[in-house]
Amino acid sequence: MISWYLATPLVLPFLTAVLAFLLRWGRAGRWISVAGNVALLGAAAILMARVLEDGVIAGQMGQWAAPFGITLAADLLSAVMVVITAITALAVSVYALADVPKRAEHLGYHALFNVLIGGVCGAFLTGDLFNLYVWFEVMLISSFGLLVLGGRPEQIDGGVKYVTLNLISTILFLSGVGLLYGMTGTLNMADLAVTVPQLENQGLVTLIAVMFMIAFGVKAAVFPLFFWLPAAYHTPFFSVSAVFAGLLTKVGVYSLMRMFTLVFTGDTGFTHEILLWVAALTMLTGVLGAAAQNDIRKILSFHIVSQIGYMIMGLALYTPLALAGAVFYLVHHIIVKANLFLVGGVAERIAGSTDLGRIGGLYKTAPLLAVLFLIPAFSLAGFPPLSGFWAKYVLVAAAIEIEGWAIAAVALVVGLLTIYSMTKIWAEAFWKPHPDGTDPTLASLSAHDRRSLIWPIASLAALTLVIGFFPEPFVTFAERAAGQLLDPTAYIEAVLGGPAT
């Protein structure tokens, strides 16, 4: 029974992808995509309820006992990531009804989208490193297809940069996997957590840890490995940009958090010090890159990089409060960042561009869109009492708790610079008049398009408000998730079926 709780969030996206591809020539394909993501959200909610009730759960596919078989496992972090993935997927699939043209649907957009979601869920639920590699490849293939689906030159250029750097990451990842298997004879994460500390050559373990750090760092778009992201994320459909912004880099962050709390914990003075420097430089370079841009999607793309730095900061500090802040930040940022890209898509539809110099007047003529922009924008910048404020507050408090004054100062300065970027978008796109003297309004869209575009944005904005105004249960949940990361005994016992010895 446990296996079905774990396998259903993987099976549903791929089943949806097959049906959507077979029926892609009519309207049925798009609605199958929406229905499939509704079902995925239900399965994710059931999985979360089971984890909340029973603690860490694990299942062995084909009844092959760990560490020899394919293991699926879910703790609080895995479960919440699957839930947020399902929420984002449902919002974007509804938005895509009005955003993705029929030609792209005929080429297989909905199938590629759901394969990507399946890959993301697989990465969050897998219990061994080789299958994590498999899920990364599923994501890479489907995301590359989504990037180049329109066939425009800038899409091809961005897609080539994206896939080239990610293939380098894959090679490094596989090399690390091979070395680790050669030393331990296992790739099951729980088994590695038991085996790796017993190895004699801990220096080689640290070297392998750095290899994984670089490989996952490319996926997460940390400094100095982030250049593929702003080169690619502004080129595809807004639906694609939104799901990429919300989910793809977070799989890299999740992988870092999983491996550097479960397996590579023997030399934290060295590895986590590197991660702390990486976090600070990622925050700074990302926010400075955003400040130099004048296009909504490019600004938001650089801010993905900047905000990833906060999550890595929580991992690097490696205290209960810091890891709780990282988990909270992960959840908050997926919702907010995906929503900002969706807002940018509507702005482009009614104002004609995402170049800030070519648009304006949205506050006067589309006040609803202006409000829906301000909620995630203020949250991203850390305005109280929105979700981003609490996420940054917890992380800064964690840094101050251990007298990490420098990283706390960086986090605060980057927050101020984030306000600058969000204010620039507000002033140029919403406040100033449109340079052509036109009045961009939501009324220019059909009723169907307005519903498909606005309802997902409003729903994600409402979720941001809920987290912001009622943060206590979410912070408590994040603290419990952090506790499981710092003490993985329950995870190891659930996977291996016995005491963690």
Image (cartoon, grey):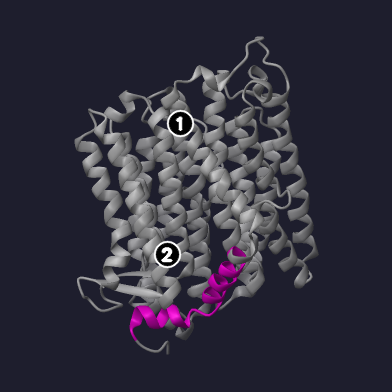
Q: Earlier in the sequence, mark 2 or mark 1?
A: 2
Question: In the image, residue 354 lies at what x, y percent?
Answer: 58, 25
Q: Element at badge 2?
A: helix
Disc 1 residue type (three-letter):
Arg
Position of the N terminus by quadrant: bottom left
Q: In the image, 353: left or right of 384?
A: left
Is 260 in front, or is 32? Answer: 32
Q: In the image, 12: left or right of 290?
A: left
Is 259 in front, or is 319? Answer: 319
Q: Is residue 13 magenta?
A: no
Position of the C terminus by quadrant: bottom left
Q: What number is the disc on residue 176?
A: 2
The residue positioned 43% from the left and 83% from the top of the image is 194
Question: In the image, residue 331 lies at what x, y percent?
Answer: 55, 56
Image vertical order of residue 151 relative to residue 207, above or below: above
- Nearest to the eye among marks 2 and 1: give it: 1
Q: Residues within 10 Å of mark 2 (few under 14, many from 20)?
A: many
Q: Residues within 10 Å of mark 1 (few under 14, many from 20)?
A: some
Asked if residue 191 shows in the view, the reply is yes
Highlighted range, magenta: 474-497
Question: In the image, residue 92 lies at what x, y percent?
Answer: 43, 40
The residue positioned 60% from the left and 55% from the top of the image is 467
Magenta span main SS: helix
Q: In the image, 244: left or right of 363?
A: left
Q: What number is the disc on residue 451?
A: 1
Is 345 in front, or is 53? Answer: 53
Is 464 in front, or is 329? Answer: 464
Image vertical order of residue 465 relative to residue 161, above or below: below
For the residues labelled 2 and 1, say whether their Cβ atoms are less than 8 Å apart: no
Image vertical order of residue 109 relative to residue 476, above or below: above
Image vertical order of residue 336 relative to residue 367, above or below: below
